[in-house]
Amino acid sequence: MARNELRPVIKLRSTAGTGYTYVTRKNRRTDPDRVTLRKYDPVAGHHVDFREER
C-alpha cells in the first residue's frame, strides 16, 4: 500500500549555501506552497532559513 500523498516527504536545503539538508514531511492541505523553516545549520554554525526543494 502506498504512503498517503497528503503528507509527502520533502527536502529542506540551507539558504546559506552549505549544501546541508533536512528531510521532513509536510501537510499539503495546510501548506500548499513551498515551505521555509528557520533551522540550525551545523556547517554554518547558526540558524538560517531552509527552503523546500523539489
Image (cartoon, helix red, strand yellow):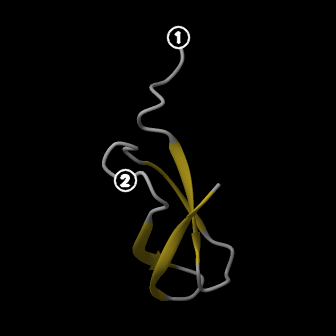
Relative to residue 27, is residue 51 depicted above or below? Answer: below
Residue at x 60%, y 86% (from the top left corner): 16
Residue type beneath disc 1: Met
Q: Amino acid under label 2?
A: Asp
| Residue 28 x, y percent position in the rendering | 40, 44
Q: Residue furthest left?
A: 30
Residue nearest the observer in this picture, 20 or 1? 1
The structure residue drawn at horizontal position 34% and vertical position 42%, both measured from the top left corner, is: 29
Instruction: Give the SS element for disc 1.
Output: loop
Residue 27 position within the rendered picture, expressed as x and y whole percent measured from the top left: 36, 44
Dot 2 alpha-carbon crowd within 10 angstroms: few under 14, some 14 to 19, many 20 or more: few
The relative height of residue 8 versus residue 49 in the rendered view (above or below) is: above
Q: Nearer the viewer, residue 27 or 49?
A: 27
Could you say where residue 53 lies in the image, as x and y percent from the top left?
62, 61
Q: Compare residues 6 and 42 and report the one nearer the observer.
A: 6
| Number of numbered callouts drawn | 2
Looking at the image, residue 8 lies above or below residue 48: above
Q: Is residue 10 left or right of residue 19?
A: left
The residue sitting at 41% across, 48% down in the picture is 26
Q: Which residue is mark 2?
A: 31
Which residue is label 1 attached to? 1
Expressed as whole percent of the image width and height from the top left, the position of residue 24 reads 46, 51
Earlier in the chain: of badge 1 and badge 2, it is 1
As drawn, 47 above or below 52: below
Q: Which quarter of the figure has residue 44?
A: bottom right
Q: Residues within 10 Å of mark 1 (few under 14, many from 20)?
A: few
Mark 1 vs mark 2: give the one in front.
2
